[in-house]
Amino acid sequence: MKKIVTILGARPQFVKAAVLSRVIKEHHQVEEVIIHTGQHFDANMSAVFFEEMEIPKPTYNLAINSLGHGAMTGQMLEKIETILIKEKPEAVVVYGDTNSTVAGSLAAKKLHIKVIHIEAGLRSFNMKMPEEVNRILTDRISDLLCCPTETAIKNLRNEGYENLPIKMERTGDIMKDAVAFYSKTSADKSSIISDLNLKENKFVLATIHRQENTDDVHKLKSIFAALEEINSACKVVLPLHPRTKKILEQQSIQPNITLINPVGYFAMLELLKNCKMVISDSGGLQKEAFFNKKYCIIAREETEWIELVENGFAEIVGSNQSKIVNAFNKYKTATIDFNIELYGNQVGESIHQSIVALLTK
Ligand code: UD1
């Protein structure tokens, strides 16, 4: 059986890997070995996803975290290389745009091991974002690019990828499968709605963790001031990322909204299903809002998921307090038809087929 090594490290990667690992197990055509870099390590940022989503236990956990970008990526590169030399896989699978993604792909490429990038071709066109750098580097050294959207394919074509010996497939967005699969049981598995005494359509779900927002106190204060203002009309619930928590504490910002610890996937799905609207700077949550037919206010200056904005399912407002509040007031009573196919179908199956085709070529 052909062997692949999957590199995981951060929360959104666990969600995506859960889908593909399940499909891989069902087909028995490929053996998967998982390396967890340790980038996210709190139980509620990591272990809870492996348990709830039944992701196979990683064979390796590198425990590399809480370092600057260079040290983190460098240490991962070194340790992953050692493991790849030992495991000798046919290919390495990486997800998204994190430091774990770029370290995994680079380690593999230098050993002439094929690289498969899932969620390829996304661009924010903002090179100050560490994620943009990671995804551009990873795409360029991959052998198979599994693209979630038509926009992603277009981005790659614009960068001349058609002239490179790299396979591009529009497989669709793997998070769509995750939402569809785990939504079936989330209400039985999580009691978060009753625990927090939330009422359907009567609260806003917010998350804020992007470096561009957390590392700029002015922006951070402005976003939280907007959330407080909205909270006076409609309860705002915000699962707090450890980075944001640290900075709020350092700056003595104590927002008057419902701050909760990071939640597992079932609880997140329940919050998404029941909320009125989403306000976020996360990439993944923008689409999860769409899959749950919820409008998303994007607290960033750009988005990789531009089709959401173009089709009227999300608006980019940045960190400006009044823009965030105005967007909430504009959309709180809007009726939007979410029935449009933007992100493919049976995405896990489609990625699995592309991987098998690459390995048997
Ligand atoms: C990373 C990814 C980003 C992704 C995000 C999802 C990079 C460059 N960024 O950002 O693309 O959207 O994950 O959440 O890889 N921390 C804890 N406990 C944890 C995890 C993190 O305390 O379980 C702390 C870290 O020590 C660090 C901070 O939170 O101080 C930020 O974590 P880091 O892994 O650097 O990046 P994220 O902001 O999570």
Image (cartoon, rainbow, N blue to C red):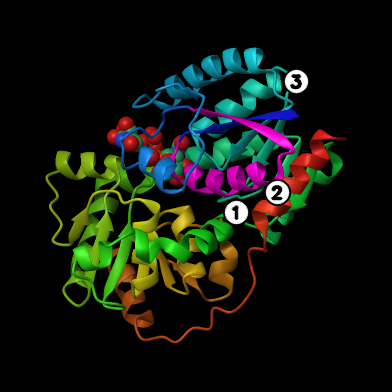
User: Counting residues from the N terminus, which is met first, the one under dot 2 or under dot 3?
Assistant: 3
**Amino acid type at mark 1:** Ile
Residue found at x 42% / y 53%: 282
Q: Position of residue 230 (x, y in %)?
A: 23, 72
Q: Is residue 16 highlighted in magenta?
A: yes
Name the residue carrying label 3. 112
**Left or right, residue 227 beside residue 315:** left
Q: Which mark is residue 174?
A: 1
For marks 3 and 1, give the CA distance: 26 Å
User: Counting residues from the N terminus, which is met first, the one under dot 3 or under dot 1?
Assistant: 3
* Cβ atoms under marks 1 and 2 closer than 8 Å: yes
Determine which quarter of the picture holds residue 244.
top left
Q: Quadrant of the C terminus?
A: top right
3 shown above or below 269: above
For marks 1 and 2, give the CA distance: 8 Å
**Left or right, residue 104 beside residue 299:** right
Q: Position of residue 153 (x, y in %)?
A: 73, 54
**Amino acid type at mark 2:** Ile
**Left or right, residue 88 beside residue 59:** right
Q: Which contiguous range is marked in magenta?
A: 10-36
Name the residue carrying label 2. 351
For marks 2 and 3, give the CA distance: 21 Å
Is ligand 1 less than 8 Å from the beta carbon at label 2?
no
Q: Position of residue 181 (x, y in %)?
A: 53, 60
User: Counting residues from the N terminus, which is met first, the one under dot 1 or under dot 2?
Assistant: 1
Residue found at x 66% / y 48%: 121
Q: Secondary structure at mark 2?
A: helix
Residue found at x 41% / y 31%: 39
Q: Nearer the viewer, residue 58 or 11?
A: 58
Q: Secondary structure at mark 3?
A: loop
